[in-house]
Image: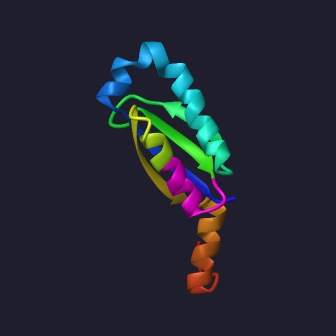
Amino acid sequence: MPIYVSLVKFTEHGIATMKEQGIARSDTVQKNIESLGGKLLHAYYCLGEYDVVAILEFPNNRAAMKAAVLNSSLGHIKITTMPAVSRDEWRELLGEIWGGKTK
C-alpha cells in the first residue's frame, strides 16, 4: 500500500482540551484512519514546528485525503499529508527516467 507522511499541529482548542480528551481523540484519529482502509504505522510526538509526524498506509490518495479532512474536522489538529516513496522506490523511479544510470 502507498505510504503517506502527515505533519500535524495541535490547534489552540486541541491544546486547551488535551488533558480531558487527548487519549480519546488519538484513538478516534486512529479509528478514522482504519475506517478508510488505512493503517497508522508510526506516530512521533515532536518539539518544533509540528507536534506529531505520522507515517501511514492508505489504499490511495482519495482515502488519505478523506482521513485528513475527517480528522481535521474534529477541531483539535491541522494536518498536512504528503505521499512518500521508499528509498528503493526512489532508485527505481530514477532508473526508469535515466535507464538505470543512477548511482
66 sits to left or right of 46: right
User: Residue 82, percent across and down?
Assistant: 48, 56
Task: Please state the horizontal and vertical placement of residue 27, each as a whole percent of the image.
Answer: 60, 28
**How many numbered badges does the structure rendering display?**
0
Q: Residue at x 65, y 41 (%)?
A: 41
Of 58 and 7, the residue lying toward us: 58
Q: Quadrant of the C terminus?
A: bottom right
**In the figure, is residue 84 to the left or right of 8?**
right
Which residue sits at x=54%, y=48%? 67
On screen, residue 97 above or below 103: below
Above-or-below relation of 52 to 2: above
Magenta region: 58-68
Q: Which image quarter is the N terminus in? A: bottom right
Task: Evaluate whether residue 52 shows in this view.
Answer: yes
Q: Which residue is nearer to you in this view: 75 or 85? A: 75
Q: Tell me the residue at 55%/55% (across/down).
A: 64
Nearer to me, 82 or 92: 82
47 lies left or right of 12: right
Q: Position of residue 77 (x, y in %)?
A: 40, 36
Residue 19 covered by magenta stretch:
no
Q: Residue furthest bottom?
A: 99
Estimate the x, y position of residue 6 in percent, counting from the top left: 48, 46
Q: Main secondary structure of the magenta part?
A: helix
| Residue 39 seen in the figure | no
Residue pushed farthest top? Answer: 19
Q: Examine the rendered structure and indicate whether residue 64 appears above or below residue 11.
A: below
Residue 29 falls in which quadrant of the image? top right
- Report the front residue among 102 and 67: 67
Image point 56% across, 83% down: which residue? 97
